[in-house]
Image (cartoon, rainbow, N blue to C red):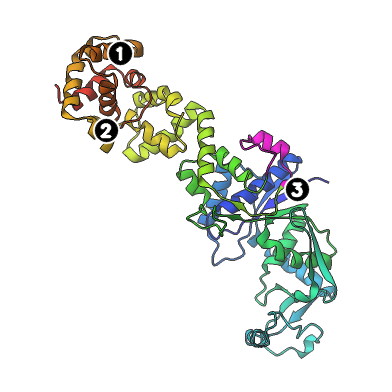
Amino acid sequence: MSVVVRFAPSPTGFLHIGGARTALFNWLFARHYGGRFLLRIEDTDRARSTPLAVAAIIDGLDWLGLRWDDQVVYQSQRAPRHAEVARQLLAAGRAYYCYCTPAELDAMRERARAEKRSIRYDGTWRDRDPSEAPPGVPPAIRLKAAQQGSTTIRDHVQGEVTLANAELDDLIILRADGTPTYNFSVVVDDHDMSITHVIRGDDHLNNAFRQKQIYDALDWPVPEFAHVPLIHGPDGAKLSKRHGALGVDAYRDLGYLPEALRNYLLRLGWSHGDDEIISTGQAIEWFDIDGVGRAPARFDFAKLDNLNGHYIRLADDHRLVALIAARLEKVLGRLLCDTELGRLREAMPELKLRPKTLVELTDNARFLVTPRPVEPDAKAVKLLSPPARRLLGELLPRLRRVAWRPASLEEEVRRFADERAIKLGSVAQPLRAALTGSVASPGIFIVMRILGREETLGRIADAAGSP
């Protein structure tokens, strides 16, 4: 059997983190077995589905590197096929017309509440002749569901789960206005797309019982199911925005690399021994849905940050320069010149060693493209005291004469400190504050080399108040 899986989001908002993990698990499962990963946009809720949400989902999957096979399937375009299958069930006697009005259905629900029963359709039209239909009432089509026995789902994650058929009523498969319902559309689409495995969140487990009954009524093979536990916050509560329930686009804006987010999402509910850092190639080789645990995973930003820092250190320097250059240009409101881009490239091997996000990396690199005079931050201001500024003014003419190499620069600054019987840090720290506007940077003599003679001397003169 050739594996075919799908990711089927509803475009009513952004691609949230739980949806991204579901897409990842489906993508990895398909790639592991050499199968196909399909994308279906379930846009039948026309009032809430928007082109912007569709674009956000597709953009999010693209950024994560989860490319699907074949063309995108839009569920709304398949409504005629859904109606055709509903009529087939009707002709086979496995579905029936229901002429209940909205008022009658409301009254049915109220009686159930008053009698403290579960709210279910009572089968009013299940065995009645359509000739008894009231005039002017357009009918819905309901599935003639099994009333005795039980329905069992054999799930790769949840195990064997059984529900009594008495708990399932005759669900509507085609509304009175001719539009299909969610569970029915899903079954028809999954069958027509030859889906072999349905991997999704366990909030869909109850839908699986209804969907299996539809498969059985149509004499269609039932796909294998895997209902993955949802993601919770670090406190065990349902994931919310304060925990990290953001769109994938927000994680990109927060400075996470797609490979880091893929690795992190992979480890949310799936494991391979004690391995934490798992490359995409390893993930494809190792992944199987039976390795997903039953307990909800807990989202932890600290772990994501540490993982992202690891991938930043591994990333190609030219790629990182392109990523932070775009961020810097947005902040500065202008394009970077070749000289500034060159500084970023030269500094990147040092700059990428400590940041955990691209936001931090961008902040740390900003001094390389900041126009003079450099505005020091609060900590740097404290280092640039009047005595420190005088020291920089005295150091300036000596630096103008030295060869512009880190070793030569360091030798001259050390000599200057020794002559004044002060520690090297008493000169190097104000020098760093003057050149970068902060108290942290790559090695100061490397910074001087990267900035170049003219820019370095100009920034020192600005800080010292010297001409």
- Residue range corresponding to the magenta coloring: 271-291
Query: Secondary structure under badge 3?
Result: helix
The numbered mark at residue 71 is none
Give percent across and percent down for residue 136. Answer: 67, 87
Q: Quadrant of the C terminus?
A: top left
Say which residue label 3 marks.
290
460 lies left or right of 362: left
Q: Does 185 sit left or right of 341 as displayed?
A: right
Q: Which residue is mark 2?
A: 380
Using the image, determine if residue 71 lies above or below residue 136.
Answer: above
Q: Residues within 10 Å of mark 3 (few under 14, many from 20)?
A: few
Amino acid type shown at disc 2: Ala
Q: Quadrant of residue 158?
A: bottom right
Residue 312 at what x, y percent from top left?
Answer: 50, 33
Circle 1 sits on which residue? 409
Residue 440 visible? The answer is yes
Q: Are marks 3 and 1 in contact (CB under 8 Å)?
A: no
